[in-house]
Image (cartoon, coloured by chain):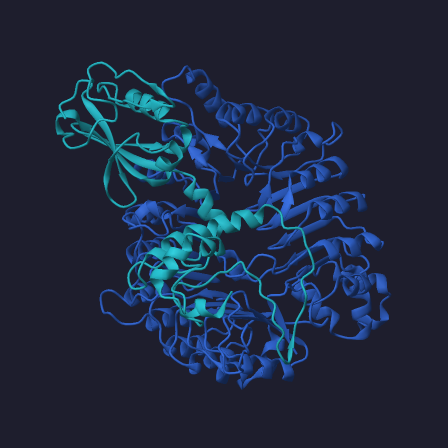
Amino acid sequence: MMNYFPDEVLEHVFDFVTSHRDRNAVSLVCKLWYRVERYSRQRVFIGNCYAISPERLIARFPGVKSLTLKGKPHFADFNLVPQDWGGYVQPWIEALARSRIGLEELRLKRMVVSDESLDVLSRSFTNFKSLVLVSCEGFTTDGLAAIAANCRFLRELDLQENEIEEKKNHWLGCFPDSCTSLVSLNFACLKEINLAALERLVARNPNLKSLKLNRAVPLEALQRILMRAPQLVDLGTGSFVLDRDSDDSETYRKLRTTILKCRSIRNLSGFLEVAPHCLPAIYPICVNLTYLNLSYAAGIHGSELIKLIRLCGKLQRLWILDCIGDKGLEIVASTCKDLQELRVFPSDPFGAGHDAVTETGLVAISSGCPKLNSLLYFCQQMTNAALIAVAKNCPNFIRFRLCILDPTKPDPVTMQPLDEGFGAIVQSSKRLRRLSLSGLLTDRVFLYIGMYAEQLEMLSIAFAGESDKGMLYVLNGCKKLRKLEIRDSPFGDMALLRDVGKYETMRSLWMSSCDVTLGGCKTLAKKMPRLNVEIINENDQMEFAPEDSQKVEKMYLYRTLVGPRKDAPEFVWTLV
Amino acid sequence: MPPDTLSDSPESDVTSALTFKDTELTLGIPGEPTRSPAGKFCTKRGFIETVDLNLRTSTSKPRGKAHADEVDDRSDDVVSGTCKTPASKTQVVGWPPVRSYRKKALESCKYVKVAVDGAPYLRKVDLETYNSYQELLMALEKMFTCFKIRGNYLDESKVIDPMKEMEYVPTYEDKDGDWMLVGDVPWKMFIESCKRIRLMKSSEAVGLAPRTPPRCTTTT
């Protein structure tokens, strides 16, 4: 029936299909739909920059306006991937610049970005509007200066947790006076900033909705900025310190008055430096908050934290440090009835953890917040009983990531592995898409995961399992698995090679400090030409006549349509 | 790396760790070519041809400051890794899984507890906000206004006069759990190693030798 409509009608219908997956599905229906879809696609998501080439992207989607690219594997976040592994955005930007693509938005995660890339980007696309860099590295504030100076219609510059070298230039001053289109600016990951330029920039950008400052912005400047931008929805404070003794009571009074006018703020973060006695200034806006991120606010603890949280009755997302303690989590549970996402980070990853949280806090949250669907929880210990209770109270988990600081710790009450607890979670949360395990775990937990986690897309395993059976349960059972990352677990060639076709249905597999051997990896690479099987040999452990029987320290494999990458460093071997 | 380093004993590794190997940033017990809980990192990039392996020569790519930061991050692990025995508190690379950005951001908040003998509650100060012992002690004096704190600090070659009516000696607990007199080590080193501060009554400060010659009034 749809074939009787002209292409424009089909296109118009497809406009309502926005998610990447849905559009991918649409493109597979028939050749006509494939053709119409590809010309009308504006947003493209590429989860692994090595799975495809920029040229093929451009050829297929000539109308692309927004591109999302991800580079390094997830475990790169935890220093498991050496420097110079790859993930360079330069070839993408160069290819896009050469083409006639009217790029407007670029979102990068875990990629290496150079000043040159940013410079080319800033000059090549007249309508460029939005740059989002998450966990990227390789550039300096010179690159930011190019973006500021050349992107005349820039709406968004969002720098999240990047490693940026800061030069003496005042990049923020490179925004011309004619720049009045900013909606979102986040430079929290920088150490310095030109305050005067910042205040002028805020003053001439009345559409600014999201502003995240860094530590170099003192409280007095925050007050002046908020005066200019009471329309902010999303605020990240920088330094929130006023010396109690000095004559700053005037500043504090002004701050309180100004904040009262900021009735639109729904998301609050920052407090990278904070004097707790200044916190009452934000009490009036707490009631409106739906997202609160205090995970970098090491200066707020105990009773001040609790006083603040008691005021945040509408919170849906809370990111906090574990110094909140179990008692603090009980307050969260009784106050934040709409809570959907909770992240509890360790304030002292290697310390004694006196303030850390335990299973008690999590159970309290689960009973007070039944809407909870996303969890990241770093804790001292966990019990099966607690996990079973959590599973019962909260059957809606989409993301469940538990990190017990001692990675092989059993249930401290029963001394049993945590298989039953995680089993309960996967059985009850039928929509679970992402799971991270920790604690003492046998093959049994993987049996449960394979049996029940039907929607699971990403699984992170560390120091778990007893034999190849564990990995096999997962590979056989989880039909929707896309990303599997495993470290320090006894899975070897037998599991790796049982179903080689599985890996073409997935984005990637990471295995480090497991039992897979060079021979096993070679066999896999030979059987599956559309996988890149990369061995990271950083230690020269493979230097001396590596035998096929030698265990591989780090293996990363991913499906690809473009063969072995040409930019791999010498310590990365792509097996063929 | 020469083959015989694989069979080095831990002791010889510690001594050689002070020289070449220190900059190599290797972790864990050497001589174990495969998996070990302490993990491994090595900046040396050897290039050896092997049969059947598809090798790529490296192309030069901009490195950026990130490399230096990464190195610093690992060097913390080295200090703890090579000096500790594998059994107890070996720090495993990449565990707990916290992004290095976050670790660095929280590390740079150096909040330590300050206790004063006789005061009913403790305070916390962020050592990062001060640039010298002078600033810290002045801030502490302001915080605990009823107590006068003693300080004798050799500032370059200058001796600062002891304050009048010294009742309290500033001491601190370092990373090893030892109680030390504030002021002996350079400021930066102090921030790195200080875990908590105690303003100790002078009368109790027996055994902690004053830094300046005993012309100043003390009970030690």
Give the camera-side residue of B202 and A512: B202
Q: Between residues A283 and A492, which one lies in front from this camera angle?
A: A492
The x and y percentages for residue A505 are: 61, 76
Report x, y in % for residue B206.
14, 30
**Chain B, colour shown:** cyan
On screen, residue A266 above or below A107: above
Q: Residue at x 35, y 63 (%)?
A: B10
| Residue B212 visible in the shown view | yes
Quadrant hosting residue B56: bottom right
User: Is residue A65 depicted above or below A166 in this figure?
Assistant: below
Q: Is residue A517 above or below residue B153?
A: below
The chain drawn in blue is: A
Q: Quadrant of the C terminus of chain B?
A: top left
* Residue A561 rendering spot, x and y as whole percentages: 71, 72
Q: Nearer the viewer, residue A7 or B112?
A: B112
Residue A208 in the image: x percent, y percent?
64, 34
